[in-house]
Image (cartoon, helix red, strand yellow):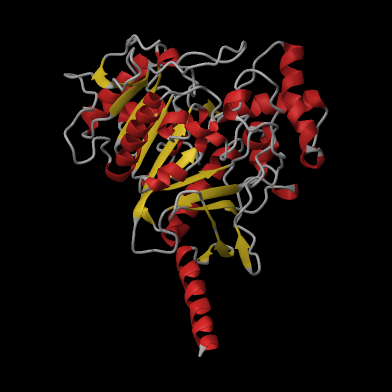
Amino acid sequence: MKRILLFAAVVWLMAACAEKNPVLTIAGGQIQGVPTETPGVTVYRGIPFAAPPVGELRWKEPQPVIPWEGVKVADTWGNPAWQAAHTPGGYTPEFFFDGDPAFSEDCLYLNVWTPAAGKTEKKLPVTLWIHGGGYSAGWGFEPEMDGEEWARHGGVLVTFNYRLGLLGFLAHPALSAESEHGFSGNYGMLDQIAALRWVKANIAQFGGDPDHITLMGQSAGAMSVQTLVTSPLSKDLVAGAIIQSGGGVSDQPLLGGTPLAEAETMGQELMEWAGYETLEQMRTASPEEMLGILMRYMMEKKQYLRLSPVVDGYALTETFNEAAKAGRIANVPYMIGGTLDDMRGLADGIERFCFLREKAGIPAYAYQFARRLPTDGREGVLQGAFHSSELWYMFKSLRFCWRPFIPGDYDLAEQMITCWTRFAATGNPNGSGPEVWPPCTIDNPKTMIFALDYDGQVASKAGVLVATGDE
């Protein structure tokens, strides 16, 4: 009898564990996540969403994921794309782990945080985060991008890596000639679209709603969001968009897309300068070689070369600016803003964007992050409400940062992640409560300013783009 009871208890325990952390069937095979410190939240690290873009697949559109056998335990981050090593100082103490992870061309992996693994009936709002880094640096599992708190607030968060630098955005006449669609240069962008399509096809297994996907990105990630809501390959898959420190509508002609012919000329000149005359030579060169070419060229020529999405007539048929002015971007809710110390140069473009969205029938929400982060007195670190500083707050990931935060910082982070996840869920950061964050309109051009007062208490309010006294 005791053996029967013990066997029954073991079976019950195994069933309970399987229910909490079920094996999911997705593109490529079966997968199982790992629990986080938050009860009920599971993270899946390093899920492949496309085949490794190596060898003959270098500078090719992302290909379907290679199937695996058995159950893949998703407990390890996938390698970030090749990029320059991060040196001490600058953003390194803020946004990267101590020491870089191993970089690799085999980099097309994503991560999922969810409170509803295996519960397909839940249909929770899904957010796809695109990391920044000037299209040449960064990855989807930097500590400030941790999704545990996001999932605790009832959303499914997906982050991912994509190809960067020359391996992600090189345009070249020979590459265009071999392409089925006659283009080159948008490989990193196509990786982003592949990740979005993977989410559409697979996220229901994680408890997410494939018909309710919000794009969210910061800096180059925000410009990527702008590209994806413009692209005919992706804009119909989007339910909402959050644009952080990526600007709004600008009159700068190259912001948001370089013409294909111009990008091809630049790429051909660069490769010929480096001594690569054929695609075979270009594809057999090591990623380390490719990494050094651009910097050496710019230093020798004293000329800056911009690597970013290309208006190729296929993946991107016009710039975000052109499409936004003509009302041809995805007609969905938008949130847009930046930080106090980088926003002064972005404010006009953000307001212009919001006014255009009002005319399109769905007013947008604007924000400014004005909390100047506390320091511990060390020299050579970033100070103020600098570019990217809001990430610790809207992900509520302050526990990973070395700064001496006060209780008010955690309260502000709770306010911000609540607004962000509400927007992802409903298209409105106010949720069902009273409206404290109005949309930015022509007659009421208000921006939600997130800040603390002199006493360290949350003092966020709708206002104009000015400093708040938060020192």
Residue 323 falls in which quadrant of the image? Answer: top left
Which residue is painted at 36% across and 45% down in the image?
A: 153
Q: Nearer the viewer, residue 17 or 359?
A: 17
Query: Residue at 69% across / 48% down in the picture?
Result: 57
- Considering only vertical position in the picture, is 370 above or below 196? above
Picture quarter with the C terminus: top left
Q: In the rendered view, does 206 fall on the left or right side of 462?
A: right
Q: Is residue 269 above or below residue 44?
A: above
Residue 38, position in %: x, y? 45, 49
x then y, percent, for residue 228: 44, 38
Q: Quadrant of residue 318?
A: top left
Residue 410 placement (x, y as % from top left): 40, 30
What is the tally of numbered marks visible in this picture?
0
450 or 358: nearer the viewer: 450
- Is residue 205 at least partly visible in the picture? yes
164 with respect to 335 (left or right): right
